[in-house]
Image (spheres, coloured by chain):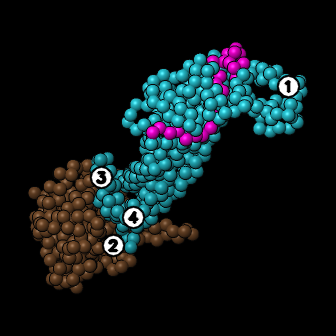
Chain colours: A cyan, B brown
Amino acid sequence: MLWLIIKEAWVSISSHKLRSFLTTLGIIIGVGAVVLMVAAGQTVTLVINNSFASMGGQLVMLHPSFVVTSGIKSGQRPSITSQDVDAVRELKGIEAAAPMVFATAQAVYGANNWTAALRGSTTDLLVVNKWEVEKGEPFTSKDVKSAAPYVLIGATVANELFGFNDPVGQIIRIKNVPLKVVGVLKSKGQDLMGNDQDDIIIIPYTTLRQRIQGSRIPNRVNFGFIKISDDEDMDAAINRIKMLMRSRHNIKTGGEDDFEIRNMTAMVETVKTVGLVLSILLASIASISLVVGSIGIMNMMLVSVTERTREIGIRKALGAANRWIMLQFLTESVMISFMGSAIGLALGIAISQIAGSILGYEVPISMWTLVLAGAVAIVVGILSGVLPAYKAMHLDPIEALRYQ
Amino acid sequence: MSKEPVIELKHIGKTYFMEGGLSQEVLKDINFTVTEGEFVAIMGPSGSGKSTLMNILGCLDRPTVGSYILAGREVSHLSDNQLAEVRNKSIGFVFQNFNLLMRRTIADNVSLPLIYRGLSDKTRREIALKYISMMKLSGNQDRIPSQLSGGMQQRVAIARALATEPTMILADEPTGNLDSTTSDEIMELFTDLNKAGKTIVLVTHEPDVASYATRLIRITDGRKEYDGLVKNYKGLSK
């Protein structure tokens, strides 16, 4: 008989399609909103993880202090040199230390040209930033010493300048300086900010500073990118770097650092935590609409019971026990909630996927969301249906049959 | 061969208790027995208590005092759920305003009480079609009530009442919403059902309708005023 009551509930719902649909609207929006918010949160987390995965490990950035407060002793502004970075590399617990020089330049190959980001560094950059060379070979430390005219190009640059041809061994020109492509970097895609990480040319910093920029202080770099060994205590290593730099820059006790050591890993953790907190906050706010949706169902079910007073009287007169009436209305409530949840889930997933593909992000679909939607459906359905079902089952058949 | 008693009312009384300690005695010491195959009309002016008596007979209400044995079972003190079961098994209701589910098909309407017996869809439809045919409504099983005339709707209700093969048909002003021609048709139908052996209890205030029955019970001011053959009661003619 249970199955028959469930069928009766279904027939009741489908014989009032518009009313049933309007009842589910609240749940559709509620579940849809929560699914959307959860997807947004998970996408942000995924992007963060992917972006920072290319860094991985304990990373630290060493750069000149941006704020100059206590006067400039030697008449020079604060700076980091390649020797500073070399000295850091020799410290205990440092796996790699890469100097970094930033520039933007137009690269020319035959009739093609392309403006790309230029990164002057040593081979340590490949370790620190987890770059892999897909075709060809990276340049060597000897090449760096000799400011050899060799470059590694990213996938986008390879595409733009060479199309389907093999770039390895070809000569490109930057500011009229001929440079041989010795290797192509493996593709990384977009980063957290939406920047194309493959639009890059890695070149020995010596070559960049001396040959291309023609600088008179070729050893000055923008910053140092440092990777601390995984089994080394990060704070202790950072302290060592700080002591070394203070001594190298002749900073007296009590004097301010003219450099900054930024803990990238800590930053990443902070960003991740912020991302998580944001996700939870968004989902919680969206859940409020679920409460509203639930109230909507209860409201409509109460109205439905009143409207169907005569019907309930008929059923009771014909022999429906109180519990079958209660079960029918409770089932109707759960079914409505379930349908609303399913539609809300589908809509939430659809919208988040479409938004993701428009904005260029991969939006994960988690099993968790599906389970959550199902659980919400049942709980909300039962809670909203209890009061109306109770009211229905206690109607007096004689009164109910008289109801107009 | 003697027929079994279907209804045995002994010293049935019903009192309504209201606020302020007031009470109203609606039925006083009602006694009668109905045997299988009888066609009884219960008549009375409004306020006489006949509606209350009908509700008790139909197991929709319980008497305050007295004993009601229906098909051999004492039902005066049963719980709500037990009464529901008794109604499903023993009573076939026919109401003045038909009381069909307007959005469901005729077949669904006729088979409605069978849901509460747990019968399968297939069985229920078979039974429904049988009684739809018996009521000369074949072809209408998938229509909805609003597509049928009043007389046809009442026949659907009668088919529904018969579908559970109850101990008795209990009809409350069954022709109240019908014109006189259709009324006669429906009352002829009841007569045929009774001839085939069905016990019928009819509640009405119209003498023309009551005259189709064989036995008349008249209720006035909560008491039984007359209990005998219809044709012997002065003031009634066919």
Relative to residue B229, is residue A272 drawn left or right? right
Q: Is residue A396 visible?
A: no
Percent of width and height locating residue A326: 40, 53
Q: Is residue B224 above or below residue A114?
A: below
Q: Chain of mark 2?
A: B
Of labels 1 and 3, earlier in sequence is 3
Relative to residue A73, is residue B111 drawn left or right? left
The residue under the point 50% across, 42% down is A114
Q: Residue tagged by mark 1?
A: A251
Are the two marked residues, 4 and 1, in contact with CB atoms closer than 8 angstroms?
Answer: no
Q: Residues within 10 Å of mark 4 (few under 14, many from 20)?
A: few
Q: Secondary structure at mark 2?
A: helix
Q: Chain of mark 1?
A: A
Question: Are the numbered discs 1 and 3 placed on the same chain, yes or no?
Answer: yes
Q: Is residue A15 above or below residue A3?
A: below
Q: Nearer the viewer, mark 1 or mark 2?
A: 1
Percent of width and height locating residue B205: 28, 79
Are the two marked residues, 3 and 4, in contact with CB atoms closer than 8 angstroms?
Answer: no
Q: Residues within 10 Å of mark 2 (few under 14, many from 20)?
A: many
Of labels 3 and 4, earlier in sequence is 3
Q: Residue B39 magenta-drawn?
A: no
Seen from the viewer's position, the closer of residues A286 and B237 is A286
The residue under the point 57% across, 42% down is A193
First to last magenta residue range: A85-110
Q: Residue tagged by mark 2?
A: B50
